[in-house]
Image: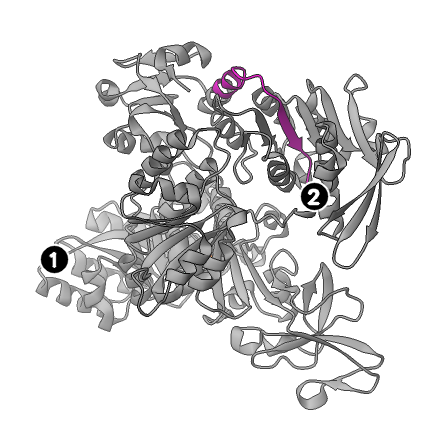
Amino acid sequence: MTLSIRNIIPIIKANWFGNNDISIIDTISIDSRTLQNGKHTLFFAISGPNHDGHQYIEELISQGVQNFVVTHFDENLKSKANFLVVENTLEALQKFAAFYRNQFDFPIIGITGSNGKTIVKEWLNFLLSPDYNIIRSPKSYNSQVGVPLSIVAINEKHNLGIFEAGISLKNEMEKLQKIIDPTIGVLTNIGSAHDEGFADIGEKIKEKLKLFTSVKVLILNKNRTICAFVNPKIKQFNWSSDDKSADVFVTKKKLDEITELNITYQEETFPVRIPFQDQASVENAIHCLMVMLYFGYNQKVIQTRMTQLYPVEMRLKVKNGIFNCTIIDDSYSSDFQSLKIALDFLEHQKQHKKKTIILSDIFQSGLTNEELYPQVSQLIISNKITRVIGIGETISKFKNKFINGICFKNVNEFIAAFDPETSKLNFENETILIKGARDFHFEEIVSLLEEKTHETVLEINLNAISHNLNFFKSKLAPKTKLMVMVKAFGYGNGGFEIAKLLEHHKVDYLGVAFADEGISLKNGGISVPIMVLNPETTSFSSIIQHQLEPEIYSIKGLKAFLKIAEQKKLKHFPIHIKLDTGMHRLGFQENNLLELIKTLQGNETVKVKSILSHMATSDDLAHQAFAISQIELFENLSSQLISALKTKPIRHILNTSGISNYPEAQYDMVRLGIGLYGVSNDDEEQKYLENVGTLKSVISQIRTIEKGESVGYGRRFMAEKQTKVATIPIGYADGISRHLGNGVGYVIINQKKAIILGSVCMDMLMVDVTDIECKEGNTVIIFGERPTVNEIAKLLQTIPYEVLTSISQRVKRIFYRE
Ligand SMILES: *Cc1c(COP(=O)(O)O)cnc(C)c1O
């Protein structure tokens, strides 16, 4: 892409302010973190309800960006950059992408449906890439923002595009259609996902079909409900397993671990084997096979390539590595687009200064190697990667392009050179991004560098955290500041990683319970101000040293803090005054107020940064009158304090349920806790939150016991009939309450409930899998989407807070982004 600002202005109908409209653009960005080529980047300042790209403009200018699409700008910056002013920056980005798409006329496959879009896209890429230079949307970039960003990555060398479109509301698809403008449509399975935005299934189908208004052919499963909505003028190429009049008739037979499809097409019948048995994968594979048939591939090629389909891993996972390393596992793909995303993700992981990337040859950029590798090198340099380990014949040839580059022909050579004791290939205290195309089998490198963990893990979805944060932000007045509570290891979910994410989202404060929690965040490089709720007198010194901000809740505590602060000759050190308005836990009461004022008046050592109180019943409307009395007392006491001290501190009283139930008491800030982690005590609100943590394990062993036999300690389960029992390596030492034993609790295996049999042991528990098709090694869900933490809390007659924070530290946390 080489367009100048002058070319772009009419495309997006902008008003131009600036000094250099011949500035050349070759990169589009909406995210200040993924800056790669500052000077030639056009930054679209996208503003949503919760995030505003305009906030980053000054910072970006200082990094060399000169071109911005904005709705407004600061006059003072006018001489420093070009501003293209539009009414709506997202629409401008979409218009630009639609224009850009129009410059190319090779076939483009557009995929939509409720499930399977990303898998079908990735598989098609795999199946067709031997013959085409493919551009595809990276990961699951299928939204109003993701689609235009994917489209602007097309270049002259590509000759086939594969893009997915995802919608959750009415009227979104039309926009995506204009941008992708697919020539070949693929409709995957229509299920119940994202139903909220649509009145009924008919409306949803109609909306999805809008992607295909100008395709030459639409590939789909011949299904009466759906076909009734398809415009009869659109040429269909359909398949069915029960309607022989379909273009392609498919029968399926399960063999050992695989499925054999029998394909009847144009009077010929031939078998195709695929390495899956579950219905969703089989359906997705058939859609891919249909595209191959449409492209005119012969039986042999189809048969060979389809047997090689593989499970698609769409997540970037963060794992603990050996020698205190952190591993980002992206060992399933290697193309330029997804490399950008992975490097962006790496940028979030600031635990370690040193960063290494292990990278395979890169495929399907559409560029020649001579064009590609210098670009890759540039990308790596701008992301400040300390060391590059290239693996592959091609990347090895470009070794000198990489600073600190070491290359190996293949994974085996790398493994041979790797000896944790002696080799020059040492890994220690660093973040390692492992990114390789599937054929390179980088999973072997991951397993080499990964710290060996138990099979039980708590997977944390970072996207869901962002989603929940935005949900609560949307309930706040624009001026209300946000403190997020990350105490107790982020409610059991992980301290540092979550703090890092919150820092990016520009929350105003973090809250921890004790000083050591705050210190470890500061040591990790978190720079958002941190309030310590319960600072012990013994920790005052280190609180000061680490620039943490104590909550002060008693005269005694205040005097002790002042004493140390005066010794250190501090000036205006920020403190937070806690008022007790009825919780009766910590805080100054009305009768301490005079002494508090006397001590603080004229004091220059500390500065009251905020005044807060905490509600006892914000979650329970039965106690509404009490809650209101707390708010009133807070108003009264804090006002007295403010007028006596002549300061303007931040006032805050609401926690998560307070935000929902008493929005009028937002004051200047709120303190979000459990809601961020995806749990609400309100069923209606719960629907809007996304699940954050999934506690997973595996089946260690399966056995069948006879009637009259027992399971576990104390023989507390007695089989009344023949029973299939599965053992799972998670127990009360991991935080699974013993009260879930003896039929109270259950886990999910292959989407079915498996009741806990007998007592929960320290490190294991047993469940009933009599009616569940499963085998050893299968995944077990302890909580997540189902059962939810809320559900488990109810079974235990406790609150979700306790369930979450009980998960012991021996359970490894794995963070991922979709
Ligand atoms: C934990 C805590 C919060 C957050 O409460 P949630 O109910 O999790 O939102 C807010 N304020 C104080 C003082 C807390 O201790």
Asked if one can make out residue 282 in the rendered structure from this viewpoint, the answer is yes
On the picture, is 20 further left or further right than 274? left
Please say whether residue 479 is one of the residues in the magenta stretch: no
Up/down of 155 relative to 270, above or below: above
Q: Nearer the viewer, residue 779 or 575?
A: 779
Q: Position of residue 179 (x, y in %)?
A: 56, 22
Report which quarter residue 750 is drawn in: bottom right
**What residue is rendered at 27% in x and 59% in y?**
523
Up/down of 391 relative to 595, above or below: above
Q: Which residue is mark 2?
A: 304
Residue 361 numbered tag: none
- Residue type at mark 1 is Leu
Q: Nearer the viewer, residue 174 or 621?
A: 174
Q: Nearer the viewer, residue 302 or 144?
A: 302
Up/down of 17 relative to 759, above or below: above
Q: Position of residue 148 (x, y in %)?
A: 51, 26
Q: Which residue is mark 1?
A: 570
Up/down of 157 relative to 735, above or below: above
Q: Position of residue 506 (x, y in %)?
A: 36, 43
- Residue type at mark 2 is Thr
On the picture, is 108 further left or further right than 101? right
Which stretch appears magenta? 96-114
**What residue is rendered at 54% in x and 57% in y?**
619
Looking at the picture, the colour scheme in use is one colour
Q: Secondary structure at mark 1?
A: loop
* Number of residues whose C-alpha sits closer than 10 Å to that of mark 1, classed few (under 14), some (14–19) or many (20 or more): some
**What residue is rendered at 48% in x and 54% in y?**
442
Give the number of the mark in front: 1 or 2: 2
Is the shortest distance between ligand 1 and the CB of mark 2 under 8 Å? no
